[in-house]
Image: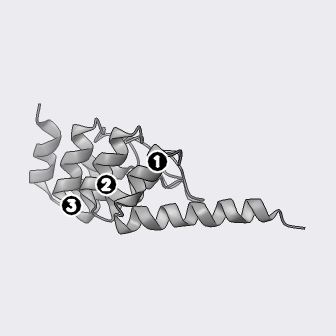
Amino acid sequence: MTDPEAGDAVAFAHRMFDLARAGSELLPGLVDKGVPANLTDAAGNTLLMLAAYHGHARLTGQLAERGADVNAVNDRGQTPLAGAVFKDTRDVIVVLLDAGADPDLGSPSARDTAAYFEKPEILELFERP
């Protein structure tokens, strides 16, 4: 027999991931009320990772301010910064770097991704003070 409370928790978590993908302004308040800032899905993607990958710079910053790990690595070795580089979302890249994201983490790293896609302007962002 399945535990109905466990099913409710899984459904709730899925809603949180959907809010991150959509860039919902509700999510920071929910984190303030107890949703774990580093909640991960079955593939190891965090709320911040999903917000960053989907181009939501403001939400990415809000989650980082609430303790979400900007250097989290998912089950495929990807970081939020590498995802933002892949999607070429400069505003998200800057937010992540300002929050302490390391361009050399992950596989491929954000630096490797920028080099592969020949994005010298992104590589320059990694070198700023």
Give the position of the N terminus as an image quadrant. Answer: bottom right
Residue 25: percent from the left, percent from the top?
34, 60
Q: Are discs 2 and 3 less than 8 Å apart at CB?
A: no
Q: Secondary structure at mark 3?
A: loop
Q: Amino acid at mark 2?
A: Leu
Circle 1 is placed at which residue position?
31
Q: Is residue 113 above or below residue 100?
A: below
Circle 3 is placed at which residue position?
89
Q: Are discs 3 and 1 less than 8 Å apart at CB?
A: no
Point out the tag, 2 or 3, that comes first from the N-terminus: 2
Q: Is residue 121 above or below residue 2?
A: above
Q: Amino acid at mark 3?
A: Thr
Give the left or right position of residue 43, taking residue 51 as reference: right
Q: Secondary structure at mark 2?
A: helix
Circle 2 is placed at which residue position?
59
Select label 3 or label 1 by which is in front.
Answer: 1
Select label 1 or label 2 by which is in front.
Answer: 1
Q: CA distance from mark 2 to mark 3?
A: 14 Å
The answer to which image quadrant residue 113 occupies is bottom left
Q: Secondary structure at mark 1?
A: helix
Point out the tag, 1 or 2, that comes first from the N-terminus: 1
Q: Is residue 109 above or below residue 4?
A: above
Give the position of the C terminus as an image quadrant. Answer: top left
Residue 2: percent from the left, percent from the top?
84, 66
Select label 2 or label 3 by which is in front.
Answer: 2
The answer to which image quadrant residue 70 occupies is top left
Q: Amino acid at mark 1?
A: Val
Q: CA distance from mark 1 to mark 2?
A: 12 Å
Q: CA distance from mark 3 to mark 1?
A: 24 Å
